[in-house]
Amino acid sequence: MATVSIPACTSTVLLDIEGTTTPITFVKDILFPYIREHLEEYLSTHWEEDECKQDVHLLKKQIEEDMRQHRSCPVHTVDQTVHTDEEKAIREVMDNVLWQMAADRKSTALKQLQGHMWRSAYSSGRIKGEVYQDVIPSLKRWRGQGLKVYIYSSGSVEAQKLLFGYSVEGDVLDLLDGHFDTSIGAKVDGKSYERIAERIGCQPEEITFLTDVTREAKAAEEAGVNAVVVVRPGNMELTDDERAHYNLVTSFSQLELTGRA
Ligand SMILES: CSCCC(=O)C(=O)COP(=O)(O)O
Ligand SMILES: [Mg+2]
């Protein structure tokens, strides 16, 4: 198995989740169906709670932003099955959430609500966060070499902590130095990586970012971050140009820090 060197100046490994630490199938076949199945019940039960109100407020702001940007939104027909204003409002939120999920939108509003909904699924043991077999040994190895390890995912920080706190390998949050989500900026925007470096307190050049998505790798490189593209079963196919441009790994164990044991 070919090794891929990461620069000797690296002080921090920054990890994407879906398609990188975790199979895409876990997200698409377990996490997302849970939301679709429990959305109506969740909104009806928690509608009057502050946290749910904030989630709905953020979703409404996102809808306004989408309208301003002329992005298509679900069209509301008159629904004969709902009677009260609350039922109507819940149905509107549901339509929007399901529409965003069908488009695999990565909006902060959607991701925040999802994170809150997964809480009880993880804490009850119904769902356990999947991580590839090479992930935990690599996190331990990197930390042993003095590297810091952070997560940067479109999934909310709360959703990230649930996945690693209730993982198939147990609670592995101790192996992580911190978490970033899209509240710091979109993963396809170079500025987000500059902000992350600033927040960590290092130069962008000291960060190696591992992701399955080349648009994210490109944005990271624009900020001066070293990007490595992770190829896992079921990930999006890469073009010949992308294969030629990026360092590729199929397992974290292929990564070697230059000049360290
Ligand atoms: C960690 S939460 C579940 C995954 C998710 O909702 C998501 O959008 C993951 O995106 P990523 O940026 O980790 O590819
Ligand atoms: Mg990903």
Image (cartoon, rainbow, N blue to C red):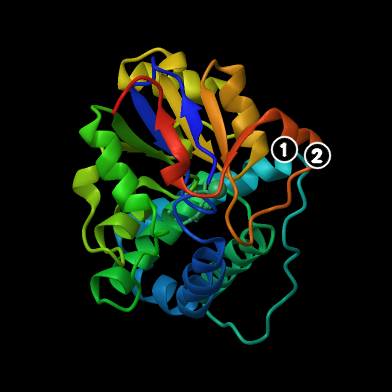
Residue named by callout 1: 243
Which residue, as the protein is rendered here, is positioned at the far bottom?
A: 81
Using the image, determine if residue 41 lies above or below residue 57.
below
The crowding category of the residue bearing disc 1, from other C-alpha atoms within 10 Å (few below 14, some 14 to 19, many at least 20), is few
Q: Secondary structure at mark 2?
A: helix
Question: In the picture, residue 8 is in which quadrant?
Answer: top left
Name the one closer to the observer, 197 or 80: 197
Q: In the displayed structure, does residue 77 sit left or right of residue 95?
A: right
* Residue 163 rendering spot, x and y as whole percentages: 34, 59
Q: Residue at x 68, y 80 (%)?
A: 79
* Residue 241 rendering spot, x and y as whole percentages: 79, 33
Spatial separation of the CA atoms under disc 2 and disc 1: 5 Å
* Residue 14 rendering spot, x and y as whole percentages: 41, 34
Residue 229 shows in this picture: yes
Q: Residue at x 68, y 44 (%)?
A: 66
Residue named by callout 2: 240
Using the image, determine if residue 241 lies above or below residue 112.
above
Q: In the displayed structure, does residue 44 sit left or right of residue 80?
A: left
Q: In the displayed structure, does residue 209 sit left or right of residue 46?
A: right
The crowding category of the residue bearing disc 2, from other C-alpha atoms within 10 Å (few below 14, some 14 to 19, many at least 20), is few
Image quarter (top left, top right, bottom left or bottom right) of the C terminus = top left
Q: Is mark 1 within 8 Å of ligand 2?
A: no
Would you say the residues marked 2 and 1 are in contact, meaning their CB atoms lie under 8 Å apart? yes
* Residue 213 rendering spot, x and y as whole percentages: 63, 42
